[in-house]
Image: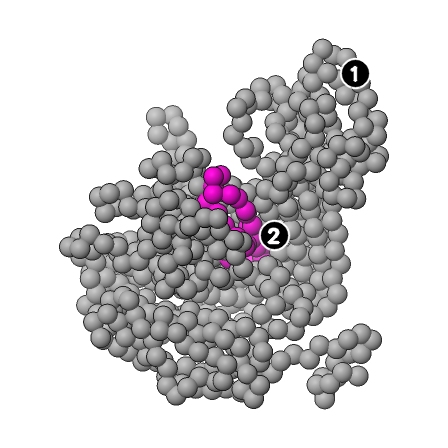
Amino acid sequence: MKYLKYLPIFLAFSTPSQATVMYGTLGNFDVINDTGRDAHGFEIEYEGLHSTDIGYTWTYSRYGNPSLIEIPAATVNGVATPLKTIIRYTTPYDNATHKWAATSNAATFPWMVTAAHQCTNPLSTDGCEHFVNGIFTSAITPKSVSYHWLVDNGAGTLVRAETLGFLTPPPAINIPVFQPTVVQPAPIKNVVQPPIVKAVVAVMPAPKEPVEPAPTQWGTPHWVKVIKTTLHSAKPVDAGALINEDKNGDGIPDWQNGEPSQVESEWYLVQKEPVGNAVGPKAAHVGAAEKINPNEKVTRKYEFYKYTGKALSFDGETHEAMCDAVAKDNLHGSLALTAVDITDAQGNSYSYDCSTDAIVGDYIGANMVAFAAAAPLTAIEVIDNGQVGQQYVARSVVSGGNTPYKITTNGQFPSGLSIDPITGILTGTPKASGVFTFSVNTTDADGKTITKAYTISITDVNGNLNNPTPTISTQSLDKGVVGAIYYLQLTAVSGTAPFTWKVAPALPKGLTLSAGGVLSGKPAAGTVGVKTFTITVTDKNKKSNSKLFALSIAAKPIVCVAPKVLNPATNTCK
């Protein structure tokens, strides 16, 4: 089957008194430790997803590779609990010294809004970390997503901060998620038709209120602002680029693919309807069904705002918000709603002018999604570390492309583990400890081929490695661009933290490697080409290991000012 790609990215903001503070897309986000306590881990919990639906996990934090935990749906004493998958970042605990190997310090407030990737330095002690959510391997989306700091419960065990009462309410951000319906039309005269996709945004979860609405009344209203962008290019756009970053330094957000875009923006009021009421347009925002051209990429950003209409804008009997259209100023009611008929609690009717009422309130959060007609063949970034005798949670190593796959492995593949050669799902229980380096080779039904190298650590039953020498787990270096910001956190497995890093010979002018393994800077003019050098990592016990890397640096893109266009033959504007 062809894999469709529907990638949700989440965005949320809050204040310390409300919930865990996050900045940036929650597919790629900075998070502030506002628990008031030092934390030693972090959890991202998806409701309604299997572990095989997770296609990407972030490893470049102080916590390294996370683990996946799948909790199946169950019913205990008549109480049903849903399926959940948790991405869990933790650090080892030393029972002799009673210390954790890594710490996210409690942050000091007030905290300024961060920029994306600001909190990736593992040597920092300012209480800010950077994580990346999973990217899903199919059109399945979670019913909800929540985020939790992990703190010591006083007995050397990590628990969610809210379970110890450090925050009120608990630090869980729940932003509505999408339930896309994808329909593949039947071929017409053997011609494959483009898929039709319809996105549904559920009603925004209502905040806790002193008085909850009665089941016979409408719930708390919220605004959904839908921003739609269509790009007429088949060039793949990575989900991370949807945060409007300009990594190649050409002055144009990367998601635009170097071309003008068509942008549309609309407001919708969503409000939970009374029990037994016929489902109407306010129950959820349902996107119109539309065909997705294989040469187009559609992105949508859904922003959520509070409804702040005055009490007179509500129906007195049912609590339905009657000012349901927003003016061009994105604040007041529409000029088309100058005489809205409303009924008060006594059943009397009166006319209300919504255009004089500020009905759009505080920004709550947002989702951004991208939909492509077909996902390219890809492999996950990292495979989790493991322990002898501990069963791996099933994981899709390969996604996209056209199934069935043909998968083989080369190198030191851990005994007891296996990758299904047709589905690409990793399962098994490790039988031996050590550091294992291997590659996964995949060919899909269309003949597309990819190879991905991995290095993982398997500890013994006591949590120790047979090979304590550190190994550099970073497989390759990202490409650089002259004059553009470059940032990459190198990683290592095995050995004993902390690690120190060195490089020889010197890096290209404009780039530096910190002792903490951060390769950063801006490649200077004259550095175009491929440079090779050796990077060495040394652990706490002075044991070291080296690896040869190649870094490719491209010239700064030439941006032509209209009406001039770029001449590819001469690489000049004409």
Mark 2, Cα crowd under 10 Å, few <14 / some 14-19 / many 20+, is many
* Residue 3 among magenta residues: yes
Q: How far across and down, in percent of the image, does residue 181 sit?
A: 62, 46
Q: Image height check: is 394 above or below 547? A: above
* Residue wearing tag 2: 368
Residue type, mark 2 in image? Met
Secondary structure category for the residue under label 1: strand
Q: Are marks 2 and 1 in contact (CB under 8 Å)?
A: no
Do we see residue 431 in this rendering?
no
Give, as a three-letter code, the residue at label 1: Ser
Residue 155 colored magenta?
Answer: no
Distance of mark 2 from mark 1, alpha carbons? 41 Å
Q: Where is mark 1, residue-wise?
A: 349
Q: Residue at x 46, y 45 (%)?
A: 20
Judging depth in this view, the residue of 343 and 77 nearest the camera is 343
In this rendering, would 44 be left or right of 571?
left
In x, y percent, where is residue 13? 54, 47
Q: Which quadrant of the figure contains the C terminus?
A: bottom right
Could you say which quadrant of the image residue 416 lies in?
bottom left
State the count of labels.
2
Q: Nearer the viewer, residue 187 or 340?
A: 340
- Please name which of the two marks, 2 or 1, marks the residue nearer to the observer: 1
Question: How packed is label 1: few (under 14 Cα within 10 Å), some, or many (20 or more)?
Answer: some
Segment tinted magenta in the rendering: 2-28
